Every structure is written in structure tokens, then in C-alpha cells.
Image (cartoon, rainbow, N blue to C red):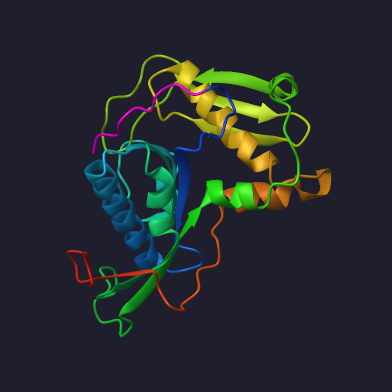
Amino acid sequence: MNYQNSSENPIGSINKSVAWLQITAGQGPKECGWVVAQVFRTICQEAKFQSLKLQLIETLAYDKVLRKQDMIEPDAYLSVLVRIEGQSAKAFSKSWAGDIKWHGESHYRPKHKRLNWFVGVVDISAEALKQNSCSINEQQLKQEVSFEAMRSGGAGGQHVNKTSSAVRITHKPTGIKIRVEAERSQHRNKQLAMERLKMILEQGISEGQKDQVRNRWLNHYQVSRGNPLRTFIGSDFKEKN
């Protein structure tokens, strides 16, 4: 699937037309990881239909053996992080933020009696703004960050980028490390990494909180089994009206 490139934004800015969504399997089994993959695919389709620009920022394969390779595309994910940009990005993210239910038979355990599987979609940008307890000085932030360029490659046999376009930044005061390879442009990946770092820091990180917040960003938010925001059914993952 192709992802559209976003327009240039100032480093570290949280544009009102930008939203970040994390899809997570929580502590669920691999079936939930499969649902994460299907929700991600559906979000991509809906974003394209609404003329929104979507960037895949980060994925974490459900199976640990598939996390440090780029030859096999996983069929299940522990979490997926996407950035969405466009006039209706905020409304779009709000329409997805919540628990998602899939009703169907397990692809991995055919005789399993369980039919209901839950994953979570979290609006990261909304969380950052809601919990904002400090104002970030962007010039100071740039001085606190070290920058490293590296080669990037795509999963599923995609062409490996032979240039050092991937970026890893380290926030020296907290030790937070962020890697981004969403774009072919090193400069753009650096912008995205800084934007992401700023949102984390705007939640109000103290030295004692850094590990907790770092884990929360990648988390595997607890997924409830209450009233799902949206429900999908069957192996073709059709939404239930």
C-alpha cells in the first residue's frame, strides 16, 4: 500500500490539521495482533477516501522473531503508529479513537471457542494536548537532541533504501530515543521525529517519569472489553452497521 507524503511543517510543531493514531493489541493474544493489522488497513482506506495524507511511522510485529528484519511482512502487530494530515484529520482520528471489536473465528486456533477480540486505537495527539503541563522551547529542544542518520528498508521484500534517510534522535536530558523512516527525505524524517518528541515532552516528563512515558508511547495500552466504538465481523473484516 502506498502512503502519501505530508507537506512540510516546522520542526516540532503540532499542526491543528495533524493527528497521530496508535493501534494496539494491548495484552491480547495474536488474534488481536491480526485485528490490529486489519484496522490499520481499514484506516488507510478510509483516509484515502477522505483525501487525507497518511504516513506509517512505526510498527511493532506481534512475533518477536519478525521485529528486527525487513524481508517478511508480519500478519499481526502488537502496535502500529500512523500520522494523519488534512483538514478533517482531527475529526477522522476522533472517529477511530476507542476500542475496536472483531467478531470472528481465530486464524491461528481454528477450534478456539472465543469469537470476540478487542484492540484499542488511541489518539496520541489528543492525549498530548489534554495532558499538556509544560511549554516546550523549540530552540532549546533542538540543542538537547543528538541526531544520527542510518539506512532504512521496508518490510515484505520492499526495496531497501541505499541512502541514509532514516533518522534516530536522542533527547539527552531524558534518554528518549526515537527512530523514523517514514519518508525518503532525511530532513522530513527528522521533522517527524522532532514533532513526535515534542508531543511526548508536552505531557510533562520529569526525570523520574521518563521510562513510564517512553513505555506509554509504545504501549500497549490496556484494551477494555466494554462498549466498542466500532465492530467488524468475519474473515473479510466487514464493519457491522
> In the displayed image of the protein, which residue is found farthest to the left?
236
Total labels drawn: 0
Residue 60 visible, this angle = no
6 is within the stretch colored magenta: yes
Horizontally, is 32 left or right of 156 in the view? right
The percent coordinates of residue 202 (x first, y second) are: 69, 41
Residue 232 sits in which quadrant?
bottom left
User: What main secondary structure does the magenta stretch of the protein show?
Assistant: loop
Q: Nearer the viewer, residue 163 or 110?
A: 163
Seen as rendered, the residue at the extreme bottom is 113
* Viewer can see residue 192: yes
Residue 161 vertical position relative to residue 72 in the rendered view, above or below: above
x, y percent for residue 90: 44, 47
Relative vertical location of residue 147 with respect to residue 234 in this rendering, above or below: above
Residue visible at 44% across and 28% down in the picture: 181
The C terminus sits in image quarter: bottom left
Give the residue at x 25% y 82%: 111
Residue 198, image x, y percentages: 64, 35
**Quick check: is 156 in the magenta stretch?**
no
* Residue displayed at 24% across by 76% down: 110
Please identify the quarter of the rendering in which residue 117 is found: bottom left
Quick one: quadrant of the N terminus? Answer: top left
Q: Residue at x 75, y 29 (%)?
A: 172
Q: Which residues are magenta?
A: 1-9
x and y percent of residue 149 in the render? Answer: 53, 18
Q: Is residue 192 above or below residue 188?
A: below
Camera-side residue: 201 or 147? 201
